[in-house]
Amino acid sequence: MGGNNHSIIDLTLTSASVELNWCIDSEEATGSDHEVIVWEVLGGIPGSRDTSKEVTEWDISGWNSTGKSEEEQTAIWEKKVVAQQYFLRAGDKTGVLDDTSSAEQVEEAAVALQEAMVGTLNSHAWRKR
């Protein structure tokens, strides 16, 4: 990377108890310098413990506006916008990462993103009962 260039890191986040098949499809044209990332969930890892049980308690199914009235769709859209703004404010703590970022900086950014996601879901998603 040159001094004036920047790079955007693509992340695939998952629970430690989920096994993924992840690869780059360099045959698929994207029209940019980015590659297509292909991934599939293979299933749970036997014997692994979900490190974030709290995640399984959120229910965002109410954010799906398919088949809803126009009024309901507007309310759902507004809820999504508020949640997105909350996440962006919380995620501001991540800082800017590039190809010169240290492992510690990446770890700090990952923790900040996780905190932003948890905070957003705690504040804006329904709890499963």
Image (cartoon, rainbow, N blue to C red):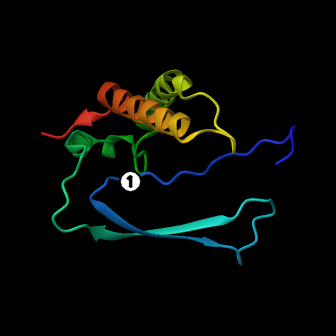
In-front residue for pair 41/51: 51
Question: Image quadrant for the C terminus?
Answer: top left
Residue at the spot of label 1: 14
**Label 1 element class:** loop
Q: Is residue 5 above or below residue 92?
A: below
State the residue lying farthest toward the bottom: 27
What x and y, as percent, mark residue 17? 26, 58
For disc 1, the neighbor class at 10 Å (few under 14, some 14 to 19, many from 20) is few
What x and y, as percent, mark residue 39? 49, 68
Q: Is residue 35 left or right of residue 40?
A: right
Q: Is residue 126 above or below residue 59?
A: above
Q: Who's the residue at 18% across and 40% down the image?
A: 128
What x and y, as percent, mark residue 103? 53, 42
What x and y, as percent, mark residue 53? 20, 44
> Label 1 amino acid?
Thr
Q: Is residue 128 left or right of residue 6?
A: left
